[in-house]
Image (cartoon, helix red, strand yellow):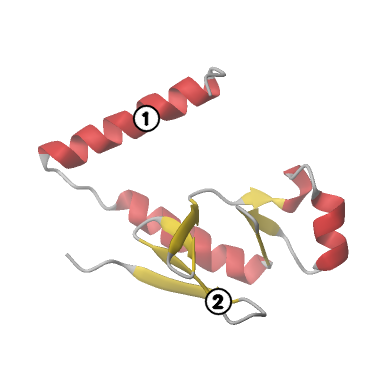
């Protein structure tokens, strides 16, 4: 199965930021699956000073509103694809259990 790749941007030093199979990646290395609004980020003042046009943060990557919209669209589309095989279902259950545990405060 070919990976689904959606380009988001290129960093100032030339590295590609893209969504690959439901994960936002920096130069092919997974960074995150969640975008955080800049207003909710604990280090928002420093990020806003360095990149005033930033609206979201994905891992350690600041994103503009249009870049975040592209990334979020690709992440959402990847979540909608459903692998109905037993291993795919197990993986979805495992992710749901981890999300629940994290929400309950387990690290």
The reply, left or right, for residue 89 in relation to residue 22 is: left
- Residue plotted at (28% across, 30% down): 93
Q: Secondary structure at mark 1?
A: helix
Report the residue at 87% width, 52% height from top.
45
Q: Using residue 102 as the reference point, say whether residue 74 is left or right of it.
A: left
Residue 60 vertical position relative to residue 95 in the rendered view, above or below: below
Q: Which SS class for mark 2? A: loop
Q: Residue at x 83, y 60 (%)?
A: 48
User: Which residue position holds label 2?
Assistant: 15
Query: Height in image: 29 above or below 81?
Result: below
Compute the Cα span from label 2 to label 1. 32 Å
State if disc 1 and disc 2 touch (CB < 8 Å): no
Of pointers 2 and 1, the one earlier in the residue sequence: 2
Viewer-nearest of discs 2 and 1: 2
Where in the figure is residue 23, as x and y percent of width and height?
43, 56
Q: Dot 1, how many residues are within 10 Å of its Cα: few (below 14), some (14-19), or many (20+)?
A: few
The residue to which callout 1 is attached is 96
């Amino acid at each position: 199965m070919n990976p689904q790749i959606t380009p988001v941007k290129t960093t100032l030093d030339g590295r590609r930021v893209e969504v690959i199979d439901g994960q936002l990646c920096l130069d092919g290395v997974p960074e995150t699956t969640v975008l955080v609004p800049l207003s909710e980020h604990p280090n928002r003042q420093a990020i806003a000073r360095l990149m005033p046009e930033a609206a979201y943060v994905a891992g350690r990557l600041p994103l503009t509103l249009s870049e975040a919209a592209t990334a979020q669209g690709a992440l959402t589309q990847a979540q909608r694809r459903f692998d109905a095989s037993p291993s795919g279902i197990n993986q979805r259950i495992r992710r749901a259990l981890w999300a629940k545990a994290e929400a309950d405060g387990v690290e």
